[in-house]
Image: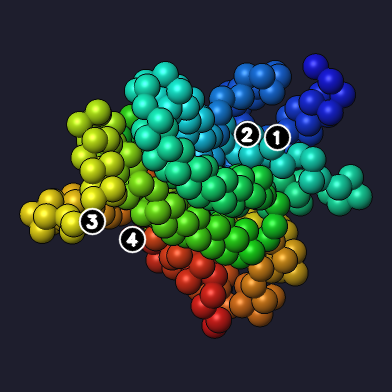
Amino acid sequence: MNIDDLKGAWNQDEPKDMHLPVSTAQLSKTTSAVGKIRNNMRNEFIAVLVSYAALIWLMFYGIQSAFFFNVTSIFVFTLIVLNCFYFFRFYLFYKSISRYDFNVKDSIRKIAYEVELNTEIYKTYNFCVTPLAVLFTFILLCGKNGMDYIRHILASNVSVAPGNLLIVFATILISFFITYVCINHHVRQQYGRYLATLKQVMDDLGQEE
Amino acid sequence: MDNEEARFLHLIGENKGILYKISKIYEDNPEDRDDLLQEMIVQLWLAFDSFRAESKFSSWMYRVALNTAIVFFKKQKRRPDNQALPYQFERAEEQSAAGEKEEQLAAFYKAVQQLNKVEKALIYLYMEDVSYMEIASNLGISEGNVRVRLNRIKNKLKELIKN
């Protein structure tokens, strides 16, 4: 059978029972991986804003201690600086990623590049924030006793007991390890298959005969 | 409904054959086809601002719709690509294939499922009688490359249909 002979039947193959939306309000949200990334970004941004509200409440009303306020201020300031940097970068990505009107090669290359770059930035962001978040949680969980201990350590002229130092280092290392495993697993689950297919398409397009 | 939206829906309605055929080429399962169709319309609407009236709407639509189809992922809960077609779908194809040409077209659609995403885009544009130059411009590859690839794809499809 000659493929060219099928063109007549192809041209006559018209949609008979195809229902198109009568208004754009009927369109559901995009289900593409790019759309999913954008939704995740928006949700994470909202979560960060909520957690800042909780942190600020804790700073002013949670524990009535000037020392606690000073320590948490340093953490919150550092977290805000980090978040501003990363979320500004994510915002640029959020605005630029939805273009589908380039040619296939440019479009796929752009999407793959942006997705890969941003998953790497996302990983870095989590690595920067995790140690701070762990230390902050540690201070919160320990409450007044923890504050007193930290104040004692900072004010005294003696070294921290090796056992205690070991506990702090071990906590940070374990949190790093758990973060590394979770973030990598999350990124692979969410975007791994998608990125692999995009790379496959790029390879297919790149083959010169 | 504003003018822009009405214009968009009118243009989509006029060119719905493009969406119908691309979804048929890229997805063999009716539910996946519906999802792809929906996704293409969403992406066309999102990108509609970038459509310049001096170019043909159908050319712009090929580009956006094909890009969407290539990066589209079917829902994971459904059957994977390499499984056999479901019984109902096969029967539906047989029932709709009244004449010999329609039967051959149904066989063609089935064979096309064996192609990769780029090959599907190439054969789709070829069947739509898009010039080699325009195919090359849509895909971002050279015209010579389009010719060579299309010859290979046609031979591959012939073999697939024969078997």
Q: Label 3 vs label 4: CA separation? A: 85 Å
Identify which residue, A134 or A143, lies in the foreground.
Answer: A143
Q: Quadrant of residue B92?
A: top left
Residue tagged 4:
B163
Above/below status of A151 relative to A7: above
Check the residue under mark 1 and report the chain it is in. B
Q: Residue at x 8, y 54 (%)?
A: A163
Residue A169 visible in image: no
Quadrant of image for the C terminus of chain B: bottom left
Picture residue at 39% right of the left edge, 60% below the top? A196
Q: Where residue B80 appears, x then y in whole percent?
A: 30, 45
Residue corresponding to mark 3: A157
- Indicate the secondary structure of the residue bearing disc 2: helix
User: Residue at point 76% right, 51% down?
Assistant: B59
Name the residue furthest right.
B54
Q: How far is mark 4 from mark 1, CA to CA?
A: 41 Å
Foreground residue among A155 and A190:
A155
**Residue highlighted by disc 2:** B42
User: Few, some or many C-alpha atoms within 10 Å of disc 2 (few <14, some 14-19, many ≥20)?
Assistant: many
In this rendering, which labeled residue sits more in front, label 2 or label 3?
3
Q: What secondary structure is found at the residue carrying circle 1?
A: helix
Give SS at disc 4.
loop
Name the image quarter holding residue B6: top right
Q: How is the image coloured?
A: rainbow
* Residue type for callout 1: Trp
The answer to whether the residue labelled 3 contacts the one labelled 4, judged by CB atoms less than 8 Å apart, is no
Tell me the tag on residue B45.
Answer: 1
Q: Reading the chain from its start, which is encountered first: label 2 or label 4?
A: 2
